[in-house]
Amino acid sequence: MTRTNYASGATWEDKVGYCRAVQVGNTIEVSGTVAEDEGKVVAPGNPYEQTKFILAKIEAVLVRAGATLHDVVRTRMFVTDISQWEEYGRAHGEFFQAIKPATTMVEVSKLINPEYLVEIEVTAIKHERQ
């Protein structure tokens, strides 16, 4: 099977040795994604806005890979404050209400930058389009 890497251009990709997404066959795995834009944290202190930004960023890489959010079968959300679950969930629902992928939300003690409130990764299985 062919492997295709989809880089985002983040400086960390080369330093750490990863890319935003990897496709093998019709499966696309999207790396843990945080609310960062051009080196700046997006919406510090706002779990809803960070989640929306991340899911839009993930959607963009899926589109580059020829997929859509409808191809997402699993999401994983790593959050720093589970008491804010409704805010993360509200944003997630705006993207996935009709799709309903399997999902996980777990609280972690911290992410790589204390201003990141959530990190999300997804698995998508690209369907053939008519």
Image (tube, helix red, strand yellow):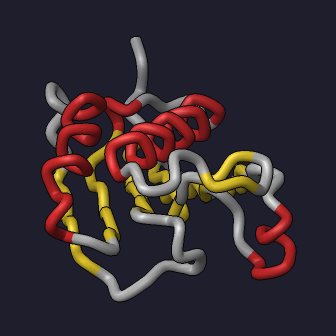
Quadrant in which the C terminus is drawn: top left
Q: Nearer the viewer, residue 114 or 90?
A: 114
Please state if 112 lies on the left or on the right of 129 as rendered: right
Q: In the rendered image of this protein, does residue 62 appear above or below residue 28?
A: above
**Which residue is at 31% across, 63% downward?**
77
Q: Could you say where residue 10 lies in the image, as x and y percent from the top left?
A: 79, 58
For the view shown, which residue lies furthest in the top direction?
130
Image location (x, y in percent) of residue 115: 53, 67
Residue 102, image x, y percentages: 16, 54
When the figure is inspected, residue 97 is found, relative to residue 78, above or below; the finding is above
Q: Does 127 sit left or right of 62 as displayed?
A: left
Where does the N terminus fall, quadrant-wise? bottom right
Q: Viewer-proximal residue, 101 or 39?
A: 39
Confirm whether residue 111 shows in the render.
yes
From where the camera sits, is residue 2 visible?
A: no
Depth check: give the residue in front, 70 or 80.
80
The residue at 40%/63% (across/down) is 118
Quarter of the image for residue 98 reads top left
Please give the name of the residue rendered at 35% of the width and 36% of the height, measured from the top-left corner: 71
Outermost residue on the bottom side: it is 109
Instruction: Count numbered badges in the picture.
Output: 0
From this view, report whether residue 82 is shown above or below residue 88: below
Q: Whole-percent x and y of residue 109?
A: 35, 88
